[in-house]
Image (cartoon, rainbow, N blue to C red):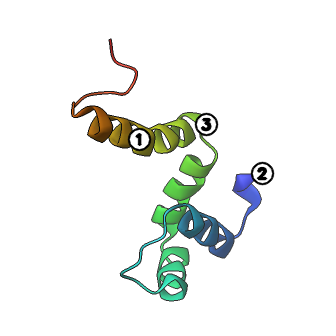
Amino acid sequence: MVASWPADAVAERWLRLFPRQDQDSAMRAEVLAGNEERIRDLRERLADLSWFMRCLSEPIARSANKEDVCKGRFWEG
């Protein structure tokens, strides 16, 4: 499914997941869509469940570590 998305759709979806406040999203999407190598990488990441889980667990782990005043992986020992 992701393989059939045009470059601008890949860039748009990526920017929805990883927005940046310091950059204009329309301009950033246009720049991303013009970079074929980067779009290829983003397509792979958007289709990869393990990448999704990594992105999902990182902010949870950071928050839990901050709350518990510790370091390391969230589900570690």
Q: Secondary structure at mark 1?
A: helix
Distance from disc 2 to disc 1, alpha carbons, whole Å, reads 26 Å
First-in-chain label (2 vs 1):
2
Quarter of the figure with the C terminus: top left
Task: Give the residue type that dot 3 points to.
Answer: Leu
Badge number at residue 58: 1
For marks 1 and 3 on the same chain, the one whose residue lies earlier in the sequence = 3
> Alpha-carbon distance for marks 1 and 3?
14 Å
Residue position for label 3: 49
Q: Position of residue 62 (x, y in %)?
A: 34, 42
Q: Is residue 76 above or below residue 34?
A: above
Answer with the quarter of the image where residue 29 lies: bottom right
| Front tag of 2 and 3 | 3
Foreground of the two, 54 or 30: 54
Q: Which mark is residue 13?
A: none
- The residue lying at 52 percent from left, 68 percent from top is 36
Tell me the residue that label 2 is attached to: 1
